[in-house]
Structure formats: structure tokens, C-alpha cells
Amino acid sequence: MMLIRNQKPKGIKKKISKKCITIAFLGIDGAGKSTNAEKINSWLNENGVKCMIIPFHNWIFADKIKKRFGKYVDIGRKKESLRPYAPPRYSFPAIVKPLIAMLDNILMYYLSKRKYENYDVIIFDRFICASLIKSKALDYHAEWLRPIWQNIRTDISIVLDIPIQRSLKTINDRKDHILYTAEQLSCEREEYLKLARKSGYIMFDSSKPFEDVNNEIKNYLRDTILLPSEAT
């Protein structure tokens, strides 16, 4: 991502050669993705950068398919249970549900980029990879989709890393949160760490105080997208 420096900065819009920069916040449950995304979104807008957040845990069509056919696909699933549903690994739902989630996410990504192409920055709260990493952790048959989702990336990918016990505590403190196990969260965390190493994603230790982490992210974004030095 190349930006052009002007002698007299007049705002980030004049310095970005790329039409719209995309940023994804990634990490296991409780890592602070949504909170940091909201804080960074406000900070960018306050400093003259037209920015918005797209929550990737919403769906375009996958929820409609689930509503119509879920009772036939997820046989034996308890509707009110907070325990994550993990189907037999090579069953029909284990194969088809990750595919539907991925296609929905890909559609959301490209539609969002087109709809908000006049924005300076689009922040994605989670991303395509998050759905497939979660699917793998729940023992869905998702590995065959890796060559597709692993090659669809945002310009900047931020991985927020926390210990498993910290994640479990946050989950237990939240009302109506799916009660993922330590084993499932460990699988997710390993995938994010591996993805960060392989793809060069930036990682932050999110077990630190929130303001410290958020300031570290701001400093990284200052260096990466060359915000004016006076950006607070």
C-alpha cells in the first residue's frame, strides 16, 4: 500500500493512492475485536479519515437458509443450548455449512467494497477467515476451503491475541454467549497465530490494558497509512 507524502498535508484523503484501504480485526472470542474496531473507527473519523465498520458476524443469505432448512440439516441440535453444535466431521452439515458461510462472507466483502468505495477506510470486525477457522475448531470439514479463503485478504489484518483462560473468563462473564471449550479456542488461536506468521499479519498482545493495546494499534496505523503526525 503506497501513499504519497505532500509537503503540506491536507488530510489523509489527499495522501492515499489506493482508493479505499481495508482493515480486518481478528482473534478468538474476548480478544477485543469489536471494541478496538469501534475505537479506531471513531479515531480515524475524528482525524478526517472517512471510515466505517462492517460487522462480519452478520449474514446476507446464510441465516435465511438456516431458518428454512436448519431443522433438517442440524438434526439433534438443541435450539436453546449455549453449547456449540459440532456435527459428525464428514456429515452433510459438516461439509456444506462452512461452504455456505464462506460464500456469504465473500459476497459481503465484495459488496461492501463496492458500496463504500468512496470511503477512505473500511474496517471489518472479523473476516472470511474467522468463519472458517471457527468451523474448523468446531470440527466441521472446512480444510478443503482453505486455498480459497486464505487468498482473500484485507490490506491490513490485525490479530489480537489473548491467553485461552482470559477468553474463557470473558465468555463466561457474557450473557448468552456460546460456551466454547478450551480445546476449541486453542484450535482457533493456533490457526490465527499460524496465519499471522505465514501471511505477515500484525499481532498485538490483547491481554494488556485496553488503552495500551489501542494506542499500539493507532501507532501502527500512523506508520502504515501515514496519518498526519498531529492525529491524536
Image: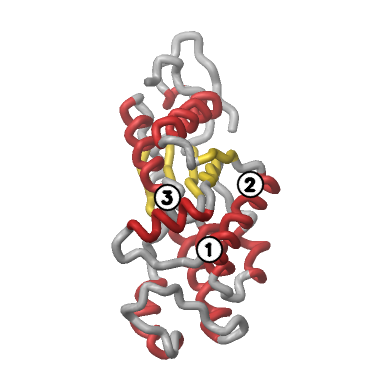
Residue 51's label in the rendered image is none
Examine the rendered structure and indicate whether residue 224 appears above or below residue 230: below
Mark 2 vs mark 1, foreground winner is 1
Residue that carries the numbered disc 1 in the rendered image: 182
Mark 2 / mark 3, whichever is N-terminal:
3
- In the figure, residue 47 lies in which quadrant? top left
Residue type at mark 3?
Asp
Distance of label 2 from label 1 (alpha carbons): 21 Å
Q: Hey, which quadrant is residue 230 in on the image?
A: top left
Viewer-closest of 1 and 166:
166
N-terminal label among 2 and 1: 1
199 lies left or right of 219: right
Given contact means CB atoms under 8 Å apart, are the residues at marks 1 and 3 in contact? no
Residue sitting at 68 percent across and 45 percent down? 197
Residue at the spot of label 2? 196
Tag nearer the camera, 2 or 3: 2
* The residue positioned farthest toward the left in the image shown: 175
Q: Which residue is mark 3?
A: 125
- Quadrant where the N terminus is found in the figure: top right
Query: Residue 171: where, in percent of width, then height?
Result: 39, 59
Q: Relative to residue 41, is residue 72 depicted above or below? A: below
